[in-house]
Image: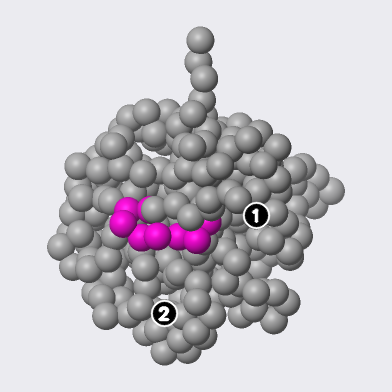
Amino acid sequence: MINMPVELCGVKLKNPLIAASGTFGFGREYDELYDISAWGAVSVKGLTDEPRAGNPPPRIAETASGILNSVGLQNPGVGAFIRDELPRLVSRGVAVIANVAGSTAESYTEAVRKLSDAPVAIIELNISCPNVRQGGAQFGASPEEAARVISVVRKVCSRPLMVKLSPNVTDITAIARAAEDAGADAVSLINTVTGMAIDARARRPVLANITGGLSGPAIKPIALRMVWQTAASVRIPVVGMGGIMTGTDAAEFMIAGATAVMVGTANIADVMAGHRILRELGEFLDKNGIEDVSELTGSLILD
Ligand code: SIN
């Protein structure tokens, strides 16, 4: 028997696999295909205080071993999420992480305030979306800006606060330490790596927004490195993500220091990725004689 539950800032998850925000919507489509309560938790599409239409299309481009997206935080607004989506997710018995984004510190605060009585397990503060002109990654680009928004949100946040970090910075550990000092209970990383695609025949950018965020296996080595560096720099838990496609990938992120991991682009490439990766992670533990998945966390051997 392998012990799969993990504890993430006081919240018990039935296993360390979390569906990553933006790749799972509100779980509606997946819910029709499989039992979504198999996930340790589901992080929903980034929610803003007011509804957002997002960026104009094209918003997605396939790349070698990855996807570029420039969705621009399309979402129905936090109020509609609480009313129309959250009850179904809760009824499925899956822990819900509300990913919250904003264009100003006030709009983050307002969205988080609206979630104070909602049955969500964790708030994931998204200070790393690279696809919006105002807010998003602007807040995650410097320790000072990160601390400013996190400390005002902390005051109104009644749930554990996890901050989602951007890899598009010189030193992610400085941002992670600022997040910890400003009251974050955990950090999740990495969000997407800014990139672009060009249609050579047309001599035009493929994405209407010109640039987008790269995710998928192409960014896994960058993500692993940043998870490892960050886990060594903060005392709060680290949730790792970036190109996890298999159970062994998930194990690698935990070995690098992650308490739990998020699976994103894999859900788009393989609709059953959540179930498959969970099974593969169990097989990895079994083959390696590991009885508790938490034993992996921070177990990297450096001689
Ligand atoms: C988007 O909606 O553009 C992606 C969200 C993100 O990268 O945080």
- The location of residue 156, given as percent across then percent down, is 18, 68
The disc at residue 77 is: 2
Q: Earlier in the sequence, mark 1 or mark 2?
A: 2
Residue shown at the point (27%, 66%) measured from the top left? 159
Q: Neighbour class for label 2 at 10 Å: few (<14), some, many (≥20)? A: some
- The location of residue 188, given as percent across then percent down, is 43, 48
The disc at residue 160 is: none
Residue shown at the point (30%, 42%) measured from the top left? 236
Residue 271 is at least partly visible in this image: yes
The answer to whether 121 is drawn above or below residue 214 in the figure is: below
- The location of residue 123, given as percent across then percent down, is 35, 64
Determine whether, in the image, residue 231 is placed left or right of residue 42. Answer: left
**Image quadrant where residue 150 sits:** bottom left
Q: CA distance from mark 1 to mark 2?
A: 31 Å
- How many labels, in total? 2
Nearer to the camera, 135 or 115: 115
Q: Which residues are magenta?
A: 8-15
The disc at residue 278 is: 1
Q: Furthest residue to the bottom? A: 83
**Image quadrant where residue 83 sits:** bottom left
Q: Amino acid at mark 1?
A: Leu
Determine whether, in the image, residue 165 is placed left or right of residue 160. Answer: right
Q: Neighbour class for label 1 at 10 Å: few (<14), some, many (≥20)? A: many
